[in-house]
Image (cartoon, rainbow, N blue to C red):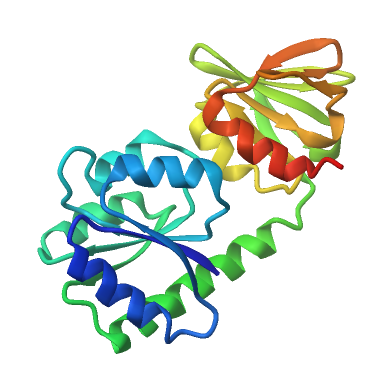
Amino acid sequence: MRCLIVDDDKLSRMSLKKLCDKVDDLEVLGTCEDGLQALQFLSNNAVDLLFLDVEMPGLSGVDLLQSSDQLPLIVFISSKKEYAAEAFEYKDLVVDFIPKPATLPRLLKAMESVRKKRSKEESLRVKDYIFVRSDGKFVRINLNDLLYVENVGDYVLFKTSEAQFLVHATLKNIARKLQHPDLLKVHRSYIINLSKIVDIQDNSVLIDKKIIPVSRAHRNLLIEKIDPL
């Protein structure tokens, strides 16, 4: 598991890194001292796990969590235990809360929870379909047939080559549920099927004659995913 440590306290960062280096299935890709640095790092690197301090100047841990819907699993760290309750309001992403100073036994316990969460998510990824509620009924969409998903006001449009379905939802919640290797969010308003791309320009992709914008923050990950020659 590739991890990133985000903490404004240098000693805490270095101490946690030393502990992580003792865990066989953990690789520390880097450390950041604030949330903005972390967002930049995440836009250019594939990270599986984020060790995230809650209290940081500028962009706090919770602010970071609210700033992106393309975050990996998170273990919060803080010297204030009262933040634990707030952390678990984001239970879809936040797996555990480690009080400072972090210890090896507590880190190992957190990693058990992380592995269970990853195992559960991986078992869900084998599903190649999703049911959506549209026009008062539940409709099955085969993910391999999906062209793209588009945010349309208070709704989300699922577009296939044969049909389209309008669902009352947010793209943020849809992105968390669409766990499929070919589906990638490339813009705050679009999730695309990588296998349906016709071509890629500097800041857009073409799918089924539709030009879809690609944001700067998502472009590097898109290029990494398609792995061009």
User: Which residue appears at 89% of the width and 19% of the height?
Assistant: 162
In which quarter of the view is residue 139 placed? Answer: top right
Question: Compared with residue 221, is residue 94 higher up or lower down, i.e. above or below?
Answer: below
User: Which residue appears at 49% of the width and 53% of the height?
Assistant: 72
User: Which residue appears at 17% of the width and 76% of the height?
Assistant: 101
Quarter of the C terminus within the rendering: top right
Question: Compared with residue 82, is residue 18 higher up or lower down, i.e. above or below?
Answer: below
Give the number of marks. 0
Q: Position of residue 119 (x, y in %)?
A: 60, 70
In which quarter of the view is residue 31 placed? Answer: bottom left
Question: Compared with residue 64, is residue 152 higher up or lower down, i.e. above or below?
Answer: above
Question: Compared with residue 159, is residue 178 higher up or lower down, i.e. above or below?
Answer: below
Task: Name the one closer to the observer, 75 or 12.
Answer: 12
User: Which residue appears at 51% of the width and 40% of the height?
Assistant: 43
164 lies left or right of 26: right
Q: Position of residue 84 (x, y in %)?
A: 20, 61
- The answer to whether residue 159 is visible is yes
Q: Position of residue 96 (x, y in %)?
A: 33, 67
196 lies left or right of 1: right
Quarter of the N terminus within the rendering: bottom right
Task: Name the one closer to the observer, 61 or 138.
Answer: 61
- The answer to whether residue 135 is visible is no
Q: Position of residue 123 (x, y in %)?
A: 68, 64
